[in-house]
Image (cartoon, grey):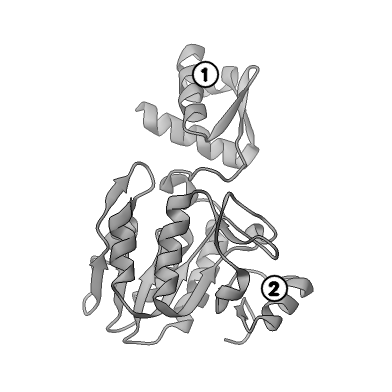
């Protein structure tokens, strides 16, 4: 097994259990404890974990992006539910911008049943997902490939998004807080999402229920800046009142689009 594969499996375990023990990982992978310590050191340097005596715990400060292969497996069922709801909102012939989040990539799978869509994205995974669809106009933003995330980043992405006027922007985030707004892990991600939102008539935030009342490092926008929230569970009355006060349509299972 390659070191990268082993580290990804360690991250998957941390997502489930929040902590790992060096001796247990050594026995599970059949490698030395020193090898596991080097893995944890690398994960610590990348900001994914916090080393502890004899192991490590997950860094839950929302300041770094997990590798895409890890993120896509987190709350996979919830993302599928959201994806179906998002697809139901989209009409044939629309022009869309889609970010590189795992939630939006999940939604893209259900968009493949539509006709004559134009899709603009900085997601490598989404470009691959859409590569077998006929009749779509698929546009890549270009940019620099960010290691592990399967997303394109850099100034080119922002310039590309800014050059299009679209019907709908679909994006996700690390969290949404009534006071702090919609937030993400770093300035680059936030800037890209701000740019794609600025060019869209309809601004759709696809967010699973675990990210409500959470906040990350950088503000993307105020809650009032979005037009739709699509989620997997009915939000609290406080959130529903907030959405109503800001003329935001909230879509969840058993709601009416």
Marks 2 and 1 close (CB-CB < 8 Å): no
Residue 87, position in %: x, y? 45, 77
Residue 79's place in the image compared with 184, above or below, is below
Q: Between 6 and 66, which is closer to the camera in this rendering?
A: 66
Residue 186's place in the image compared with 76, above or below, is above
Q: Secondary structure at mark 2?
A: loop
Q: Which residue lies under the disc numbered 1?
A: 26
Check disc 2: other Cα within 10 Å, few if <14, some if 14-19, many if 20+.
some
Is residue 113 visible to the viewer in this orientation of the structure?
A: no
Q: Residue at x 71, y 71 (%)?
A: 235
Q: Between 210 and 248, which is closer to the camera in this rendering?
A: 248
Q: CA distance from mark 2 to mark 1?
A: 42 Å
In which quarter of the view is residue 148 placed? top left
Q: Between 69 and 222, which is closer to the camera in this rendering?
A: 222
Q: Residue at x 53, y 68 (%)?
A: 206
Q: Residue at x 57, y 65 (%)?
A: 207
Residue 253's place in the image compared with 184, above or below, is below
Residue 74, position in %: x, y? 54, 51
Q: Secondary structure at mark 1?
A: helix
**Taking 193 as reference, is 173 left or right?**
right
Q: Which residue lies under the disc numbered 2?
A: 234
Q: Which residue lies most toward the right here?
A: 237
Please report whichever mark, 2 or 1, sits nearer to the chain's N-terminal start.
1
Residue 73, position in %: x, y? 50, 51
**Taking 87 as reference, is 121 left or right?**
left
**Taking 218 as reference, is 145 left or right?**
left
In which quarter of the view is residue 122 placed? bottom left
**Taking 76 as reference, is 195 left or right?**
left
Check disc 1: other Cα within 10 Å, few if <14, some if 14-19, many if 20+.
some
Please identify the quadrant where the N terminus is shown: top left
Residue 27, position in %: x, y? 53, 19
């Amino acid at each position: 097994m390659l070191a990268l594969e082993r580290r990804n499996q360690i991250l998957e375990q941390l997502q489930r259990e929040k902590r790992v023990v060096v001796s247990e990982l050594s026995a599970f992978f059949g490698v030395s404890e020193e090898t596991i310590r080097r893995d944890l050191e690398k994960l610590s340097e990348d900001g994914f974990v916090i080393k502890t005596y004899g192991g490590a715990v997950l860094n839950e400060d929302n300041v770094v992006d997990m590798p895409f292969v890890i993120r896509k497996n987190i709350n996979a069922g919830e993302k599928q539910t959201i994806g179906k709801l998002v697809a139901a909102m989209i009409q044939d012939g629309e022009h869309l911008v889609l970010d590189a989040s795992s939630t939006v990539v999940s939604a893209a799978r259900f968009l493949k049943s539509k006709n004559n869509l134009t899709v603009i994205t900085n997601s490598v995974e989404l470009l691959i997902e859409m590569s077998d669809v006929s009749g779509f106009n698929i546009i890549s933003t270009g940019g620099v490939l960010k290691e592990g995330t399967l997303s394109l980043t850099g100034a080119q992405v922002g310039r590309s998004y800014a050059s299009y006027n679209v019907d709908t922007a679909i994006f996700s985030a690390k969290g949404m807080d009534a006071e702090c707004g919609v937030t993400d892990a770093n300035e680059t991600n936030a800037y890209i999402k701000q740019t794609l939102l600025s060019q869209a008539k309809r601004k759709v935030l696809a967010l699973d229920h675990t990210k409500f009342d959470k906040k990350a490092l950088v503000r993307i926008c105020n809650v009032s800046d979005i037009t739709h929230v699509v989620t997997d569970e009915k939000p609290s009355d406080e959130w529903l009142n907030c959405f109503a006060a800001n003329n935001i349509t909230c879509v969840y299972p058993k709601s009416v689009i």
